[in-house]
Amino acid sequence: MLKILGGLKDFLKAEEIVIDGPIFRFHNVFTAVMLFTCSIILTATQLVGTPIQCIVDGLPTHPVNTFCWIMSTFTMPTAFSKRVGIEVAHPGVANEYQFDDDNHNQYDATKKYYTYYQWVCFVLFFQGVACYFPKWLWDNCEGGLMKTLVMGLNHYVYTEKEKKSKKQIIINYVLQHLKKHRMYAVRYWCCEFLCVVNIFMQMYAMNRFFDGEFMDYGFKVMQLSDEIQEKRMDPMIYIFPRITKCTFYKYGPSGTMQTHDSLCVLPLNIINEKAYILIWFWFVTLACILSLLMVYRLSLIIFPSLRPRLLKITRKIASRQDANIIAYNLDVADWWVLYMLGKNLDPIIYNEIVVDLAKRLEGSNTPVIHR
């Protein structure tokens, strides 16, 4: 397992050529690695450890454990609010048959069945694949354009002649391909939007997977500390119970149906509850950040005045006038390609390219807007 987990570190290695944004990588790389890690740990625990251990009198333990793991276990929701050790043996574990005021035996049919713990490791794996998919898609759509344009200028190791030649190639490329990068930018922004769709779809799917208990899972956990110890119901135990019940049926020697009521311990849920509280907080945070990113992208498209400010602040452009000339004489897609180049080129070389490009744009027949 450690060898497999060690292999995941390759996903987290910094790329020599940056072709996307940090939030994009948080969603595609960090989140995918986190989900894959949880999946591997839970899978190893299921295969190597003991995911369920049932207590039943008069029957061999192994068949009952296997049956209850495959067919699911259950709790009594009404028993979660009762006092442990006085009214119930464990949270959610109570007698199915209760007595009314006239001492008549009544059957409580309200049960909460748990089958999803078998599938958690698989669901986490496919969630990781879904998170990594936008990056895989963008890597294939990008076509190596950024790597081609950089030409090794991310390292300041070239002679002045070589550096000047490569800078000229980049400037000529930008001027000769004006308004030809729209599909490049649109594909990347679509991949970013796909991240937003993915994170909300996954939260919705997890909520369905846990019978509507996931959306407010984190809020309930945070509110737990404000409640009285004797009256509070732990939401982690409610969704991932550590002790459950299981009913095993068999025929007796004479062919009569026999019912065996067993108490099952689920140590795997200790890991599940911690993993999903982490996933809940991370997904909620990521959903908020990605939503703000979409607003930010739309602002760049709708308000051109933001582009020179962003270029000057994040790329340390020395001259405000050069930043204005660049931003207002390139459409948003061409500006985006030049902006991404700034993430890869040596800062000194990049500033020299921007100054030369601004002079070429100002001296060309292209109308220049000074603001």
Image (cartoon, rainbow, N blue to C red):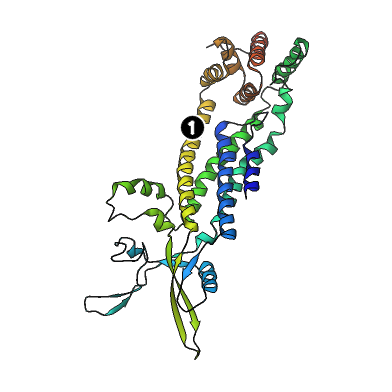
Toward the viewer: 259 or 280?
A: 259
* In the image: residue 132, left or right of residue 145: left
* In the image: residue 145, left or right of residue 336: right
Query: Residue at point 60% right, 38% down?
Result: 191
Query: Residue at point 62% right, 34% down?
Result: 188
Toward the viewer: 248 or 280?
A: 248
Please provide percent x and percent y for residue 36: 59, 48
Please provide percent x and percent y for residue 13: 64, 34
Residue placed under numbered mark 1 in the picture: 295
Task: Please tell me in which quadrant of the rendered image residue 334 appears.
Answer: top right
Q: Answer above or below: position of 44 versus 89.
A: above
Toward the viewer: 136 or 225?
A: 225
Task: Please tell me in which quadrant of the rendered image residue 234 appears.
Answer: bottom left
Please provide percent x and percent y for residue 136: 66, 41
Q: Quick check: can you spot residue 149?
A: yes
Q: Answer above or below: position of 28 versus 42.
A: above
Q: Residue furthest left?
A: 101
Task: Please tell me in which quadrant of the rendered image residue 106 appears.
Answer: bottom left
Q: Which element is circle 1 on? A: helix
Determine crowd level at label 1: few under 14, some 14-19, many 20+ residues with C-alpha closer than 10 A.
few
Q: Quick check: can you spot residue 112?
A: no
Please provide percent x and percent y for residue 178: 68, 22
Q: Answer above or below: position of 236 versus 114.
A: above
Q: Answer above or below: position of 356 versus 270.
A: above
* In the image: residue 16, left or right of residue 73: right
Toward the viewer: 241 or 112?
A: 241
Query: Residue at point 62% right, 24% down?
Result: 343
Which amino acid type corresponds to the residue marked 1 in the rendered image?
Val
